[in-house]
Amino acid sequence: MAVQWHPLLARFLRHDYADRLEVQTEVPLGELPLRADFLLIRRAPELPLPFPLSHLGSTTLMEYKGPDETVSQKDLQLLGIYADLYVYREDLPARRDLTLWLVGSRFADRLSDSDRATWPSRPRWAPALKAACWTATQHAW
């Protein structure tokens, strides 16, 4: 029978450092099941798609916010987390091989990707679509 090391380590930490550490085990990090709204896989990359679908990557993870929802910084961060999980689960060579889309009709005033850049709330072509559709490829992250 295999030794269960996690409970032993937790017991050790609690025993020796109870006055300095609170030890929690099996901590939930999100609501299960973690699911992306859409996974879009190009079947025939050589066949053209209409705008804005022409900006899809070969594999695109997409989150959609309905008309009553506002896209927030939290949504952008969660999409990045979903991307990391997907890349890990699918054993993709690099995260840049995955395109991310965050689609909504309303955006918070300012969104940023990990303080590297701050983007305006709407892309310059949004008025032509009558809905904001925002893409971010991983090489920018």
Image: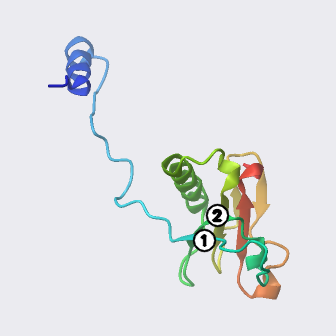
Q: From what the image shows, is residue 98 above or below residue 1?
A: below
Local packing at callout 1 (Cα closer than 10 Å; few below 14, some 14-19, many 20+) is: some
Q: From what the image shows, is residue 122 above or below residue 75?
A: below
Q: From what the image shows, is residue 121 above or below residue 126?
A: above
Local packing at callout 2 (Cα closer than 10 Å; few below 14, some 14-19, many 20+) is: some
Asked if one can make out residue 129 in the rendered structure from this viewpoint, the answer is yes
Query: Where is the N terminus found, in terms of image quarters?
Result: top left
Residue 46, position in %: x, y? 79, 74
Residue 8, position in %: x, y? 21, 20
Q: Which is more N-terminal, label 2 or label 1?
A: 1
Determine whether the residue tagged by mark 2 lies in a helix, strand or loop. strand
Indicate left or right for 61 with 137 as reference: left
What label does residue 40 carry, if any?
Answer: 1
Q: Amino acid at mark 1?
A: Leu
Determine whether the residue tagged by mark 1 lies in a helix, strand or loop. strand
Residue pictured at 34% horizontal, 59% vertical? 32
Q: Residue furthest left?
A: 1
User: 92 or 129: which is nearer to us?
Assistant: 92
Residue position marked by numbered label 2 in the rendering? 59
User: 117 or 84: which is nearer to us?
Assistant: 84
Q: Count the marks: how many?
A: 2
Q: Quadrant of residue 40?
A: bottom right
Q: Amino acid at mark 2?
A: Thr
User: 131 or 49: which is nearer to us?
Assistant: 49
Mark 1 in CB contact with mark 2 (< 8 angstroms)? yes
Asked if one can make out residue 113 in the rendered structure from this viewpoint, the answer is no
Residue pictured at 71% horizontal, 78% vertical? 132
